[in-house]
Amino acid sequence: MNEKILVIGASGKVGRQAVTLLQNAGAEVRATVRNPAAAKLPDATEVVRGDLTDLPSLHSALEGIDSAFLIWPMASVPADPAVVEAIEEHARRIVFLSSAAVRDDVAEQVGPIAGFHHAVEHQIERSGLEWTFLRPYAFASNTLAWTPEIRRGDVVRGAFGAASMTLIHEHDIASVAAHVLTNGGFSRTKHTLTGPELITQAEQVRTIGEVLCRPLRWEEITPEEALPKMFPGMPTSVAESALDGYAEMVRRPGPISSAVPDITGLPARTFRQWVADHAEDFR
């Protein structure tokens, strides 16, 4: 009998690809989205309405589920312990998409991103669930925030252009999640996920330009000017914490993890590959 897996948050970049990869691996997949009519997930997917702020809908989605892949939109939904309790009531295993901002070697987490994900991790660890935490560094898809500028001209403006990071392709995160969910041996483990290379923000802009066959360049502005521009719509405390992270990556780049190839058996995708996959999004 196939494992029945619930992808919670299946309409996003990672969740959508996880659904496809899980089905390719032979799993029976159910997906929760806020609006099933607009989900546009593969035909074989059982799509149901589910919302982390609507516990009855979550309980309904969890009926008959063996494992759950939890993708939590931290900006809009508080870290409610009742969500983990609902999953524990129905499933035996959970894979949680956390954040590399979480630190195991400190008494108190630094910044709201780390604090939020650590709170959810703590709730899961205290549950009776078998668990695996995936902790990615910066998503390559964050660079889509530059799309309006790239469509208008050849300059991207921001702070800390020398910030060097290991951007990860969302497909690689989904691939790791699918592998962990369909294979044994990952219970009570935490995995830091990164891309295969260090690349500065200025180099990212240049790479996008090379793929698009355009002379794109980075222009440095002050952190004060950059804050609302780089993180529009984000709560101020979260945006400030994120900008502090960019400043830190100028001083301390990295790191590069081998978790993606170690778990999936395939090399992590480069940023240039990600841009090629998303070139039309910038045009």
Image: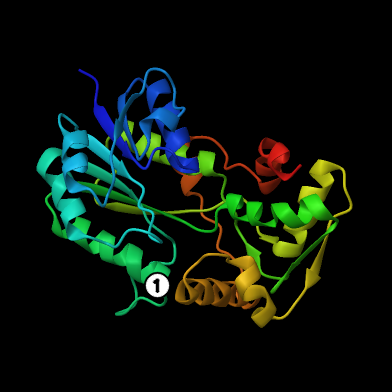
Q: Is residue 194 above or below residue 177?
A: below
Mark 1, residue position: 112
Q: Along the horizontal axis of the image, is 226 left or right of 37? A: right
The residue that appears at 39% across and 69% down in the rendered structure is 114
Q: 124 or 259: which is nearer to us? A: 124
- Looking at numbered disc 1 in the image, what kind of residue is underneath it? Pro
Q: Residues within 10 Å of mark 1 (few under 14, many from 20)?
A: some
Q: What is the quadrant of the C terminus in the image?
A: top right
**Residue at the image position 27 percent from the left and 66 percent from the top:** 119
Give coordinates of residue 7: x percent, y percent.
33, 37
Quarter of the image where one finds residue 183: top left
The residue nearer to you, when weighing 66 against 176, is 66
Question: Which residue occupies the foreground of this view, 233 or 213?
Answer: 233
- 51 left or right of 10? left
Q: Is residue 19 visible?
A: yes
- The residue shown at (72%, 37%) is 280
Q: Is residue 222 above or below residue 179?
A: below
Q: Position of residue 46 (x, y in %)?
A: 31, 24
The image's colouring method is rainbow
Residue 38, located in which quarter of the rendered image? top left
Q: Is residue 171 above or below residue 122?
A: above
Query: Left or right of 201: which side holds 37?
Result: left
Measuring from the top left, give residue 201's x and y in whole percent: 71, 63
Image quarter of the N terminus: top left
Disc 1 is placed on an element classified as: helix
Let me know if residue 183 appears in the view.
no
Q: Residue at x 39, y 40 (%)?
A: 177
Number of callouts: 1
